[in-house]
Image (cartoon, helix red, strand yellow):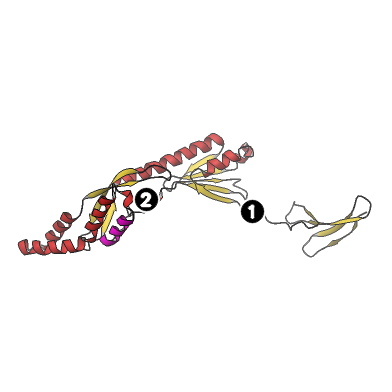
Amino acid sequence: MSKPSSRKQDGTIKVTAPGPDGTMGNEVELGINHPGELVIRTGAALPAREPVCVKIHGDIGTVSQFLATRAKVFSESLQLRSHVIVEKEEGSVALFVDEINPFGSSIGGEVTFSSDLVLLPINTGSTISPVALADKIKFNYDLFDSRETAMRLVSTFRRLHTKVKVDIEKMIDERGNSNMAREEAIQSNIPESFAVHLAIARGEPRREFIVDVCVRPDNLEVYLKSPDLFVAKRTFRDEAVDKEVARIIRIAPRLVVVYR
């Protein structure tokens, strides 16, 4: 016979069950945490906890890798209760598992680019002083054809303010048009463009891109743009997302895929 139970204030009931030899055994704690759920704890068992909502985020291959690893347990019925959100402009893919379950999991991944692409302020839409740009080129000379090529650019940008000022004074003396003189002085003292070698994705070899040099005449701030680099990044992003979605559909064909 089990020992009479005792009810605690939190609703759990303690019952001491008999051991195999007829003596009193361990206390067993019964608790109803949620309607329709019975939790049994005995001995030094940890208290019952709420389920955990798992969130995983990684690179663009994360979702397909997760599905491939869990393919045996990711049944067709679970696929029908899950969906994938694709945001191509953001380069991201996210899987929401057991969508009607408040404790369902989410697994996401996004396209990641090489760290080369942040070493110089190309296509950022912001300007930089010639001296600051010269410093960036100096410390990243390995992105150029040679160290000598990079150092020539460093010298050009560091002396830009002084050279433009001197040339403007000469041109004003000759013509008297300061605005035209300023623009001509800028054009004659900076290169229209230069070449850099950048990797689009981590682990990929570097390739050459032409970077256009633009200067604001009012303050000589510089901004860099490269249409070729812009297109290469967009192409890489779109292809990476498309390949990931194709892998997901191949592994779990009953998943709903939604594009935003």
Numbered circle sitting on residue 52: 1
Q: Estimate the x, y position of residue 213 in percent, counting from the top left.
A: 24, 52
Quarter of the image with the N terminus in it: bottom right
The answer to if 134 sits in the magenta stretch is yes
Q: How many marks?
A: 2
Report the residue marked by disc 2: 117
Judging depth in this view, the residue of 9 and 160 nearest the camera is 160
Q: Estimate the x, y position of residue 12 in percent, counting from the top left.
A: 79, 60
Judging depth in this view, the residue of 87 and 140 nearest the camera is 140
Instruction: Write the start and end of the magenta stretch as one range.
Output: 128-139
In this rendering, position of residue 154 left or right of residue 178: right
Q: Estimate the x, y position of residue 122 in percent, counting from the top left.
A: 32, 52
Instruction: Name the residue at 21% across, 61% down.
Output: 159
Instruction: Name the residue at 32% across, 49% down.
Output: 143
Judging depth in this view, the residue of 65 and 119 nearest the camera is 119
In this rendering, position of residue 258 left or right of residue 39: left
Numbered circle sitting on residue 15: none
